[in-house]
Amino acid sequence: MPYEWTSSDAPDGPRAELHLWPYRSLLRRDFVIFISLTAALVLIPLLVLIGSPVLWGILPFILVMLAGVWWGLSRSYRDGEIVEELRLWPDRVELDRHDRNNGHRSWSANPYWVQVTMREDGPVPNYITLKGAGREVELGAFLSEVERTALFDDLQTRLARLSTMTARPDP
């Protein structure tokens, strides 16, 4: 799954930390192999046209197609450079989102008052939100529906365990 939990017993550090990132089905190494194979498969039929003026009429379109595939996959990688970090302390919950397009955004609240909800009416099925400190923030919208369901159950369990560790604070 494209998220992982880490735990810490350090007195100053968070009790648990969650890192989320978008799933990558095509690794960088595979990206180069894919582009190379695509170029080879497209250019092989052109070997027949070597020395013919028709080659010069078709070649620019093939190069534009290869450049478009390269640009599209590169853009997909850049857009997917999102990392969400959720840290749980007994007295606070912090969410940091590092996004290439929107920069860095943060949210924090007291875990006793944080509500985790999964909405069916959100932009994606099983939309997870955290509500606290007067704001509602999304979590893991880039995950698959099954991954969000598993994350929701896990997050509810961890927050319930964390809120029992602390006394009831003021809202």
Image: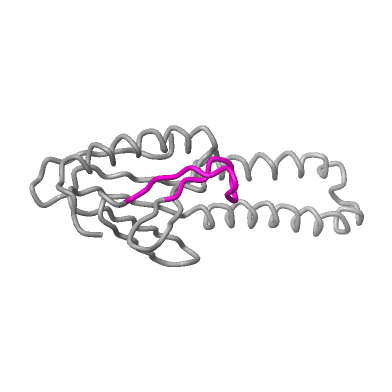
- 62 vs 138, left or right, is right
At which x and y percent is residue 117? 44, 45
- 44 vs 147, left or right, is right
> Residue 26 in magenta?
no
The number of callouts visible is 0
Give the residue drawn at x 81%, y 57%.
61
At which x and y percent is residue 43? 76, 44
- The part of the image, by quadrant, that contains residue 26 is top right
> Residue 116 in magenta?
yes
Give the residue drawn at x 52%, y 47%.
142
Pick the residue in front: 77 or 167.
167
- 31 vs 44, left or right, is left
**Quadrant occupied by the C terminus:** bottom left
| Magenta part of the chain | 114-129
Pick the residue in front: 152 or 160.
160
- 162 vs 69, left or right, is left
At which x and y percent is residue 147? 48, 35
At which x and y percent is residue 84? 38, 52
Pick the residue in front: 124 or 35.
124
**Quadrant occupied by the N terminus:** top left
Give the residue drawn at x 76%, y 43%.
42
Give the residue drawn at x 43%, y 39%.
2
Coloring scheme used: one colour
Q: In the image as oriented, which residue stretches furthest toward the left?
A: 11
Pick the residue in front: 24 or 149.
149
Residue 162 vs 70, above or below: the answer is above
